[in-house]
Amino acid sequence: MPLLNWQALKPTQVSGTVFNELDDEHILGELNMDIFEEQFKTKAQGNPKDLSTKPKKASQKAPAKTTLIDPNKSKNLAITLRKGGMSPDKICTAIETYDQGSLSVDFLELLEPFIPSDFEMKLLKNYEKDGRPLEELAAEDQFVLRFGKIPRLNQRINTLTFMGNFPDTVKRLQPQLDSLISASMSIKSSDKLKKILEIVLAFGNYMNSSKRGAAYGFRLQSLDLLLETKSTDRSQTLLHFIGNVIQEKYPDLVNFHSDLHFVDKAALVSLDGILQDIRSLERGMEMTKKEFLVQDDSPVLKEFIKTNSTTLETLIKDSKTAQEAYSSVVEYFGENPKTTQPSMFFPFFGRFIKGYKAVQKDIERKKKMEELNEEKEQSPIKSPGQKGPAMPKMPQMDLIAELKKRQKPPVREGKDGALEDIITDLRNSPFRPSVVFANVI
């Protein structure tokens, strides 16, 4: 039978939805699926199975187990436990011993919603106190009873989740802090960039001098206007003109952008998000240390704290450096660090650099075209198939006369074979334009 390629909901997504209230097995029990099997079976498939045997098998099952927890919760827990691939007892032991190797972060997050409530634990403990056999409880109820007896269960799971996420979180945050620090410091310390902005300010004041007073500075968003402002004939932008000026008058500024580092990467950083994540790491480390005070015999907790405390301290220190460097550079360029995020500030420079590089390519391309045109104008025009230097034009009659003169050299009288000597001489001495031109001149 072909597969139905639908998008199935995850077990964690079913809770609270209409699917929690549905019983598909009940529907299958009410319907005769023979016709469906016959019409939808694949060619290689044999006769449909007799689904009527299914209810009979169900009737042969052992008596239903006792369930004290919510049926929907029990159903979802069964799915989650199957995903864990471990026995319930091994799962609980791994939590008690902080065994990160056995418990993935994803599985721990799936387990967290099944931490039993006080009411559920009371029901299960009363069942146990009454002396009733635990074997009669459903497997999910037995797990919840064992699960709920783990000391400080909620704290242990939170600690394990934090420990599992810590390396990846640091690996994600550190490069962002590095790029933010590097971009901020390189932009502020670049004398070449400062000179470029000085040139832009000069042109802007010159253009506005007749209608506006001189400006002492400009907002960074004004850099975008350099590509939008065009010359009278619309053949070039203001940035093209400034680019030419830089090449001719300030060649040391041509590659000013090489002083600026990680501008594009810094533009992707959310400083507020980083600081929030670091505060979360601080709370997690504090929670882990408190857990170790209670469970001081745990080598796992001891080693984690010893290894990662320094890492967290370095991250916190770098976050403060990033804050200071960013605030400093934003204020340095006349912007407000409280209202200007990196995603807004650094793209000003990113777009300017991108536009400037494109302009530089246009200028170089134009120069090459001009050089080629000059070479064409200066070099003589060659006739098709002509090799060597081009022959300057001569008056047609003069050229014919010269050729005739060349073909009729004076006959040497008094010697035998004079005609043969002339023919031989003509054959051995091909026509040389330089000689002709020299004679003509």
Image (cartoon, grey):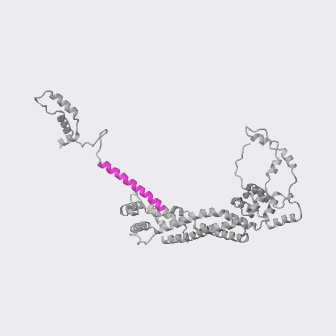
Observer-nearest residue: 305 or 254?
305
For image coordinates 28% across by 42% down, the residue present is 388
Residue 212 percent coordinates (x, y): 41, 71
Residue furthest toward the right?
131
Residue 340 percent coordinates (x, y): 54, 69
Residue furthest toward the top?
416
Identify the main secondary structure in magenta. helix
Vertical position of residue 82 compared to residue 156: above or below: above
Quadrant of the image occupied by residue 131 = bottom right
Observer-nearest residue: 206 or 270?
270
Residue 201 percent coordinates (x, y): 42, 68
For image coordinates 73% across by 38% down, the residue present is 44
Q: Give the range drawn in magenta.
A: 351-378
Q: In this view, does 117 lie to the left or right of 372?
A: right
Residue 243 percent coordinates (x, y): 40, 61
Q: Does the magenta stretch include residue 410?
A: no
Observer-nearest residue: 172 or 94?
94
